[in-house]
Amino acid sequence: MPFDKPSQAMFKLSQLGPDAGPPPSRRARVRILVMRLLGYAGFALFVYLIVKTGPKEILKALGRLSLLEIAALMGLRFLYWLIRALNWQALLIASGERVPFREILGARIAGYAVSYLTPAGNIGGETARIFCLDCVGRNKALATVIVDKTVEFLAGLSTIALAVVFLITEFALPRRQKIGLFAAIAALLLVLIFLVLKQRQGLFTWALDTLRKIKIRIPFFENRRDKILETDAHIADFYGGNRRLFLALFASYFAQSWLWATEIYLTFLFLGGNTTTFFKCFLIVTLGSFYSFLPVPGSMGVYELTYVSLFALLRIDMHAGMAVILIRRVVGLAWAGIGLIPLMKKRSARRVIAPEPCDSPVIDTGPEP
């Protein structure tokens, strides 16, 4: 087994043969069916968009790409994961943990593989990297991941807000749409600022106490209150004495949007033809980030539809645009495959060394299969 009991429940891994556990519950079967239907629908949408755009023209555009250019795109993606792993390492060091960078990088890419290849999405990916880093206490590792994601979301919303400003100045939008866009961004920023302030005081403890006040008690969380308090303490400690690191992480994630835009711009450049501007690539990255919230493996179909809509809005050639999407798919799948390597190594190690049982303090893994 690659992980211990809680992680198996998270990813719905099950045994086969005489040692297999009880069959999945009705709720679990319905969830699996819904995820499969979403996956099939996404794949169908992906195929439809390719057929609609024109497979021959897309293949013609792809034929212009050389092996050296593909290697350059893979290198840019490696730089992206390198920076994200360094961010996490800085958080771990701030929490008093010294972990080999190779393990941190492996756990980071393994989490990406889970989020890309399974319907578990971002939650599953973040859970996977916590369990991959088993040399650090679960509560402390979880605290670093929560802070990491909070800073990433703050930086992401900042880039989206900047993109909205560019969009409004670049295109003639109705006044109501402008007001609506600004209001939505302002509301999201206020929510995230509120969450950061609450994290300094104990976000999860506050959430449990709030549920108690309205007479809602969740046994799974109530039974783990001590672990939740410990996780809150780790998070509060970070915010209490690491303001410079917080700003450095924010700047790092803000810069990663520009790195992402650089990858898209170079892909268009390598394909030749009418190359789009770097400014438009930045808009594609920021405004196209909402596809990742749907629980579809690899955001199949949703990713393509989002980008195609932006290509139409920004007046980008659709054949070149679909070629860029396919290239990014190949690069993403390649890195997801690389991410499976640390997962398989973890599985081999677990066969030799029995893991110590430990529960995730704040992530509800649902019923076991």
Image (tube, rainbow, N blue to C red):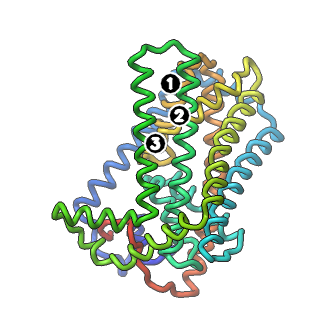
Residue drawn at (69%, 50%) of the image: 80
Would you say 195 lies left or right of 219 here? right
Between disc 3 and disc 2, whose residue precedes?
2
Q: State whether residue 304 is above or below residue 7.
A: above
In percent of width and height, residue 154 lies at: 53, 47
Residue drawn at (46%, 53%) of the image: 121
Q: Which residue is mark 1?
A: 309
Question: Of all residues shown, which one is farthest toward the right?
Answer: 68
Q: CA distance from mark 1 to mark 2?
A: 19 Å
In percent of width and height, residue 198 lies at: 41, 59
Q: State whether residue 257 is above or below residue 305.
A: below
Tag 1, which secondary structure?
helix
Q: What amino acid is at disc 1?
A: Ser
Q: Which residue is mark 2?
A: 161
Foreground of the two, 196 or 301: 196
Q: State whether residue 308 is above or below residue 122.
A: above
Residue drawn at (55%, 26%) of the image: 165
In percent of width and height, residue 338 lies at: 66, 58
Q: Which residue is mark 3?
A: 189
Foreground of the two, 205 or 216: 205
Tag 3, which secondary structure?
helix
Q: What amino acid is at disc 3?
A: Leu
Determine whether label 3 and label 2 are within 8 Å by CB.
yes
Q: CA distance from mark 3 to mark 2?
A: 9 Å
